[in-house]
Image (cartoon, grey):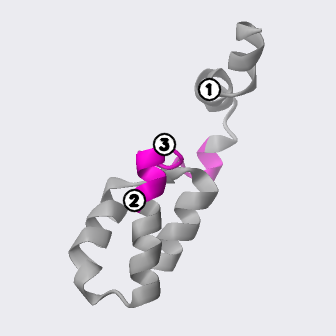
Amino acid sequence: MTVGEIFLESLSTGVITEHEVSWLTSHQSSFARPEEAAAIRLGRLMDQGEINLGCRLPEPMLRHQEVLVDWIEPLGRRRHRAAA
């Protein structure tokens, strides 16, 4: 695991896991300057609510119809239609 991998995965999914945060804090003393900057940026994105602490669902599970209907859609497009 590297800071760059965590940074890119968190940016692309909007989620950082508890394990990744723990890894970042336990290894921060060995970070190079660019890695420190990325870790600080992750913290700021978390403070702003752009990245949330949580878990990522495995890709095969995301394709399951029940997951799509019951978990993902209520948080996405259908939520905005109901409010309009």
Residue 4 location in percent, x, y?
51, 78
Residue 38: mark in rendering: none
Asked if the magenta segment contains residue 53, the reply would be yes
The magenta span reads 43-61
Q: Are marks 1 and 2 in contact (CB under 8 Å)?
A: no
Q: Residues within 10 Å of mark 3 (few under 14, many from 20)?
A: few
User: Going from the N terminus, do you reach mark 1 or mark 2 first?
Assistant: 2
Q: Residues within 10 Å of mark 1 (few under 14, many from 20)?
A: few
**Residue 1 appears anywhere in the view:** no
How much space separates mark 2 and mark 3, taking CA atoms? 10 Å
The residue beneath circle 1 is: 75
- At 69% across and 28% down in the image, what residue appears? 76
The residue beneath circle 2 is: 43
Relative to 41, is 36 above or below?
below
**Quadrant of image for the C terminus:** top right
Mark 1 belongs to which amino acid? Answer: Leu
Residue 19 location in percent, x, y?
31, 61
Between 20 and 30, the one lying in front of the other is: 30
How much space separates mark 3 and mark 1, taking CA atoms? 15 Å
Residue 30 sits in quarter: bottom left
* 25 sits left or right of 60 in the view: left
How much space separates mark 1 and mark 2, taking CA atoms? 24 Å
* 75 sits left or right of 41 in the view: right
Q: Are marks 3 and 1 in contact (CB under 8 Å)?
A: no
Mark 2 belongs to which amino acid? Answer: Gly
User: Going from the N terminus, do you reach mark 2 or mark 3 first?
Assistant: 2
The residue beneath circle 3 is: 49
Residue 52 sits in quarter: top left
- At 32% across and 71% down in the image, what residue appears? 24
User: Going from the N terminus, do you reach mark 3 or mark 1 first?
Assistant: 3
